[in-house]
Amino acid sequence: MENFHTSCSQEEYQEHVDCYDGICFACGEWVDGGHEPDAQHYLCPYCGQKAVSGTEMALIGGYIEFTE
């Protein structure tokens, strides 16, 4: 997780927030819905790791960078 970073537009970010999506720090996949903003260590359906965090938590942690 320490080396994980992803980028998206502010509009994409807001869409993920509105849909309660999470981001997997192990495989980098966005995970649809059901993730509270402060979620941590949720199970990823793509890679099976407990590495999904809520979108806001990922932003606060510095793991999401906005593109133009």
Image (cartoon, rainbow, N blue to C red):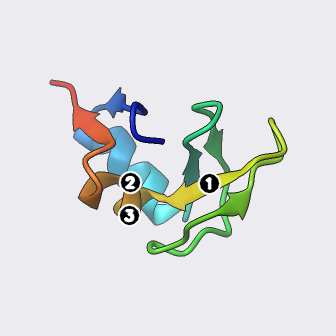
What's the amino acid at mark 3? Met
The one nearer the camera, 36 or 1, is 1
**Disc number placed over residue 12 in the picture, else none:** none
What's the amino acid at mark 1? Val
**Disc number placed over residue 57 in the picture, else none:** 3
Q: In which image quadrant can residue 27 be found?
A: top right
Are there few (<14), some (14-19), or many (20+) residues within 10 Å of tag 3? some
Residue extending furthest toward the left:
68
Q: Position of residue 56 (x, y in %)?
A: 36, 63
Residue carrying label 1: 52
Image check: 13 left or right of 30?
Answer: left
**Disc number placed over residue 58 in the picture, else none:** 2
Marks 2 and 3 sit apart, C-alpha to C-alpha, by 4 Å
> Residue at left 39%, top 31%?
3
Question: Are discs 2 and 3 less than 8 Å apart at CB?
Answer: yes
> Residue at left 54%, top 75%?
36
Q: Position of residue 43 (x, y in %)?
A: 77, 57
Q: In which image quadrant can residue 28 be found?
A: top right
> Residue at left 61%, top 68%?
35
Secondary structure under tag 1 reads strand
The one nearer the camera, 17 or 52, is 52
Are there few (<14), some (14-19), or many (20+) residues within 10 Å of tag 1? many
Count of numbered tags: 3
